[in-house]
Amino acid sequence: MNFSIGFDKRDLPKLHEAFDKIVASNKWTEGYYTELFENKWAEHNGLDSVAFSSWAGAALAAIEFFNLRGKTVLCPSNTFMATPLALLHAGANVQFVDCNRFDLCMSYNDMKSKVEAKRKPGPDEAEQYKPAAVFIVHIGGHIAFEIEKIAEYCRQNNIILLEDCAHSHGASWNGKKPGQWGDAGFYSFYATKTITTGEGGMLVTSNKELVQFAKKYRNYGKFDFVVKGLNFRITEFGAAIGAIQTDRLNDIIAFKNEYAQKLDTQYTNRVKLPDGMVSGYYKYIVFDPIENSTGKVYDEQCHRVLKHNMELPNSDWVAKNHWCVPIYYNPE
């Protein structure tokens, strides 16, 4: 199966029509299609949605809103460097948590042990594991299997929960969508994602104040500049693609799940979903070496890249012992 952008060629007439409207409108940003994309995503995801030019812009908006500068945030090491880098650029203190071998996502037990660690910190480690927030990442298209326990723990301990939903378009667990467990979630629409706008991101949340903050943040804080934002606006062209892709998302997810069911008969040593969970199958993950693999989700852990002196055995094991079977949307 060859790589294919998840855009259905049958939607090209709609795309051409949208682009013609944008050109005629002379409004190529912050217009009709930005709002349309946000409304369609909100309807799909069940949360208020704010479109950005990137995942990073969406994440930074929430990190600033929740005032995490100078505070500790727990983050899985088994993730793309975007997750810790967003925190670091916003001035937060990143501390890494191990993952599970069965879902590649944050380990509840390791997270809990780090929050509750009782030890005398060194001079550079004051309050090392007293987090203001936890940043969970849904890996490969499925939802983190321990999200319920992690979310409940965060609620009970007054810890902000952020969800990295960059892989999880179209996923659900008993009808609940990524972003609905935490205080905010962030999707990526990068070129390789299940649905894409080329570059783009979406913040989802039930927090109305965050929605208003995020809309200012993506636009330099205009017009009163109380919010110290930057330019993270999505173009009208990207938003139009996103709106069309959102309408097509159910078809894409159905196609991928049907294809995955055929793969399930071939690969038994794989990530196995719990009852009631639907994966978006951004990646189809197996634990045996395979021919024609698309590689690994991540083969280098973030705590290694950033040279944190710690041992996360499951993360290191996962980096060496999983591979991805090609699975791309191509209805032709």
Image (spheres, rainbow, N blue to C red):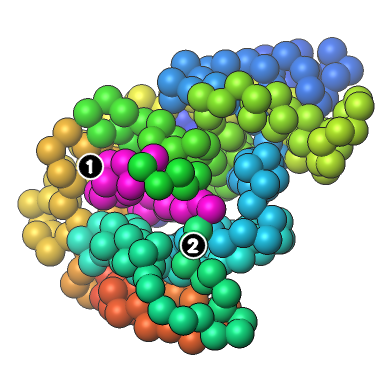
State the residue position of label 1.
259
Is residue 78 shown left or right of residue 20?
A: left
Q: Quadrant of residue 297?
A: bottom left
Residue 240 image position (x, y, % from top left) = 65, 23
Residue 20: image location, x then y, percent: 76, 17
Magenta range is 132-155
Q: As rendered, which of 302 and 171 lies closer to the eye?
A: 302
Nearest to the eye among marks 2 and 1: give it. 2
**Can you say which quadrant of the picture contains the C terminus?**
top left
What is the x, y in percent for residue 139?
37, 54
Quadrant in the rendering for residue 33: top right
Residue at 52% over, 37% down: 184
The three-letter code of the residue at mark 1 reads Tyr
Name the image quarter holding residue 90.
Answer: bottom right
Residue type at mark 2: give it: Lys
Q: Is residue 134 above or below residue 203?
A: below
State the residue in front, 136 or 263: 136
Indicate left or right for 157 with 160 as reference. Answer: left
Residue at x-position 9% and y-position 60%: 268
- What residue did someone put label 2 on? 130
